[in-house]
Image: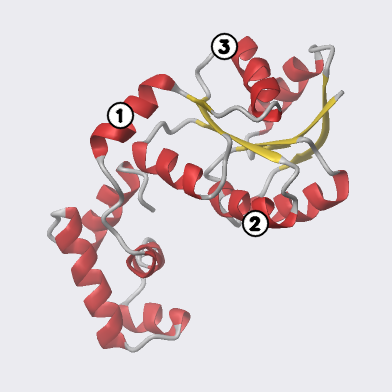
Amino acid sequence: MIKVLLAEDQGMMRGALALLLGLEEDIEVVAQVTTGDAIVPTALEAEPDVALLDIELPGRSGLDAAADLRTRLPACAVLILTTFGRPGYLRRAMESGAAGFLVKDGPVEELAGAIRRVLAGERVIDPELAAAALSAGPNPLTAREREVLAAAVDGSTVADIAARLHLSPATVRNYLSAAIGKTGTRNRMEAVRAARQNGWL
């Protein structure tokens, strides 16, 4: 029996996925979580074979949790299932050690098949997204630029961001300026929007 952990914050979607996967003879959903923070502790307790993770979750992203799972529970294969088929997300998912990346509008048979395939050591990627990721090129933002840009999402001031990230205001301005330049935008809110659309944040 393949044990699956399901991380999805939308109740109806989570319930439907659990129900549909439960109909498969060889798959059992052993744990369900609604926040990104709960993924790793729950996985360590339930020891699933496959973790099916959404990206945008309250508390913590599924991509960050995937990277932690890779080190804390290496036997667990990670399959990202998201509404947002963005090339940057796919690239980040692969960097974090995910074995698969599917978009939610695919058929459920495809999902069950993907679970079996990643468990067998295969890599499963939505073909259209793979093609888009290859043509989009790499994420131009450094890890620090992403971190500063992510801190600017809620409209925080430079001083607020500096205090939160333990950086000087001048350093924060430099990172924001670099991110604005690399995204080809006019200000930090446009840079945030562009980075999100490309899946770089």
The foreground one among 2 and 198 is 2
The foreground one among 140 and 199 is 140
Label 3 near label 1: C-beta < 8 Å?
A: no
Choose the circle earlier in sequence order: 1 or 3.
Answer: 3
**Crowding at label 2, few (<14), some or many (≥20) Cα neighbours within 10 Å?**
some
Q: Residue at x 38, y 85 (%)?
A: 167
The foreground one among 95 and 51 is 95
Image position of 149 with respect to 43: above or below? below
Which residue position is annotated with label 2? 68
Choose the circle earlier in sequence order: 1 or 2.
Answer: 2
> On the rendered structure, is 7 left or right of 105?
right
Q: In which image quadrant can residue 128 be found?
A: top left
Label 2 near label 1: C-beta < 8 Å?
A: no
Q: In which image quadrant can residue 190 be found?
A: bottom left
Q: Find the distance from the CA under tag 1 to the CA under tag 3.
A: 20 Å
Quadrant in which the N terminus appears: top right
Which residue position is annotated with label 3? 107
**Residue 135 placement (x, y as % from top left):** 24, 33
Mark closer to the observer (2, 3): 2
Q: Find the distance from the CA under tag 1 to the CA under tag 2.
A: 27 Å
Q: Which mark is residue 132?
A: 1
**Residue 192 placement (x, y as % from top left):** 30, 56
Instruction: Name the residue type under label 2.
Output: Asp
> On the rendered structure, is 187 left or right of 125?
left
Query: What colour-coding does the image apply?
Result: secondary structure
Q: Secondary structure at mark 1?
A: helix
Instruction: Name the residue type under label 3.
Output: Pro
Q: In which image quadrant can residue 37 be found?
A: bottom right
Instruction: Name the residue type under label 1.
Output: Ala
